């Protein structure tokens, strides 16, 4: 029989439809149906100056606004070949990692809802507020950040705010480890272990923590010059199931905290922005969004306006990997919901 999930469903953060083919309760095939929230952001950028288009990049997604904003700006910076102030580079890392923390927590919250553990879901939303509050203290915004600018960042940060970060992150990390242990043992582990398995070979068609949870040892932060200064190494797991993908995000939260602490040890007072003029050119830039590889291609004309823009988001790969490799063979239809949530898809990004 055919069983639809969505486009509206209590477990879905955003609208899409998953069409399951089942024999009894066992899922034998799946197909995804998109198109419910398409906005045409790439087309809307064309003809605009970077000062206008940057606001569109920040609004591709409300969950990972920071990395979209930063990737767009870093693509433009490859065109103008500007050298950033050291302080601006490190401030970008702080915001990027705080954005990753809150995104991973809302992803794991969705998994908890998918297995009907509402209490655990609300606990994760509670500690997500700690990261959101820090983001607001630094940027002035909670969701749509508009923080990175061509040549640096929009504003400097008060030293007292930077000094307060380690203590607040220590509290967040303590709770994060507690909830990680809850997932790794007891009824939650029994509910998620062995469900939605994806092999390492199959995971090469996915990206981000989803691929790393199946043993793929790659992260686009390896290629970023600022992260290369921070002795960065990838975290990965071999489980390849719902449990592994969820625990992977918990562990990456701890890694993000460590990266922020390293930056705070290095950051020095100084300027936070250069002011280059936009020129004609084109560039392609890849960064590691919370969900994986985020690619921006931007072409500008002789007036410095956007002539072409293309965005490829990680959920393009991860949603397809979910229906191709994870859903088939799910023991129950309820497991299919948990599998989908474990991929942490972002439909706003996917249908930009």
Image (cartoon, rainbow, N blue to C red):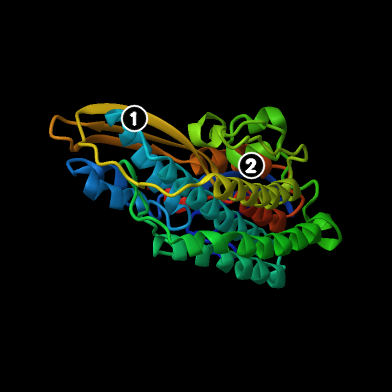
In the picture as drawn, the residue positioned furthest to the left comes out as 303
Q: Establish if 261 lies above or below 131.
A: above
Across and down, in percent, residue 51 comes to: 23, 48
In the picture as drawn, the residue positioned furthest to the right comes out as 186
The residue closer to the viewer here, 124 or 198, is: 124
Across and down, in percent, residue 317 comes to: 53, 37
On screen, residue 22 versus residue 228, left or right, reads: right
Across and down, in percent, residue 292 comes to: 54, 40
The mark tally for this picture is 2
Residue occupied by mark 1:
78
Q: Measuring 67% from the left and 31% from the top, which residue is drawn there?
A: 216
Q: Measuring 71% from the left and 55% from the top, which residue is drawn there?
A: 335
The residue closer to the viewer here, 136 or 162, is: 162
User: What secondary structure is found at the residue carrying circle 1?
Assistant: helix
Residue occupied by mark 2:
210
On screen, residue 313 versus residue 165, left or right, reads: left
Q: Measuring 53% from the left and 61% from the top, which residue is drawn there?
A: 13
Q: Measuring 62% from the left and 36% from the top, which residue is drawn there?
A: 232
Q: CA distance from mark 1 to mark 2?
A: 29 Å
**Residue 328: quadrant of the picture:** top right
On screen, residue 147 versus residue 343, left or right, reads: left
């Amino acid at each position: 029989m055919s069983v639809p999930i969505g486009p509206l469903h209590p477990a879905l953060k955003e609208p899409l439809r998953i069409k399951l083919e089942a024999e009894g309760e066992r899922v034998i095939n799946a197909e995804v149906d998109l198109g419910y929230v398409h906005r045409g952001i790439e087309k809307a950028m064309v003809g605009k100056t970077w000062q206008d288009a940057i606001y569109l990049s920040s609004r591709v997604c409300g969950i990972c606004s920071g990395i979209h904003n930063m990737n767009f700006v870093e693509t433009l910076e490859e065109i103008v070949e500007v050298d950033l102030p050291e302080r601006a580079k490190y401030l970008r890392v702080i915001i990027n990692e705080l954005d990753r923390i809150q995104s991973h927590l809302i992803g794991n919250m969705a998994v908890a809802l998918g297995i009907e553990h509402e209490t655990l879901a609300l606990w994760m939303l509670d500690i997500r507020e700690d990261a959101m509050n820090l983001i607001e203290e630094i940027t002035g915004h909670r969701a749509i950040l508009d923080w990175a600018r061509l040549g640096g960042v929009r504003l400097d940060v008060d030293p007292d705010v930077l000094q307060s970060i380690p203590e607040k992150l220590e509290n967040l990390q303590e709770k994060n480890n507690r909830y990680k242990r809850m997932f790794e043992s007891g009824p939650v582990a029994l509910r998620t272990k062995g469900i939605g398995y994806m092999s390492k070979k199959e995971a090469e068609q996915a990206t981000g923590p989803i691929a790393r949870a199946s043993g793929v040892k790659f992260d686009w932060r390896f290629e970023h010059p600022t992260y290369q200064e921070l002795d960065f190494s990838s975290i990965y797991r071999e489980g390849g199931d719902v449990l592994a993908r969820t625990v992977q995000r918990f562990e990456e939260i701890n890694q993000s905290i460590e990266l922020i602490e390293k930056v705070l040890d290095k950051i020095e007072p100084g300027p936070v922005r250069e002011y280059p003029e936009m020129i004609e050119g084109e560039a392609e830039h890849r960064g590691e969004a919370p969900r994986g590889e985020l690619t921006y291609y931007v072409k500008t004309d002789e007036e410095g306006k956007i002539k072409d823009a293309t965005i490829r988001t990680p959920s393009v790969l991860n949603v397809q990997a979910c229906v191709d490799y994870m859903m088939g063979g799910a023991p129950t239809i309820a497991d299919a919901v948990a599998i989908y949530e474990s991929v942490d898809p972002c439909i706003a990004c996917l249908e930009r």
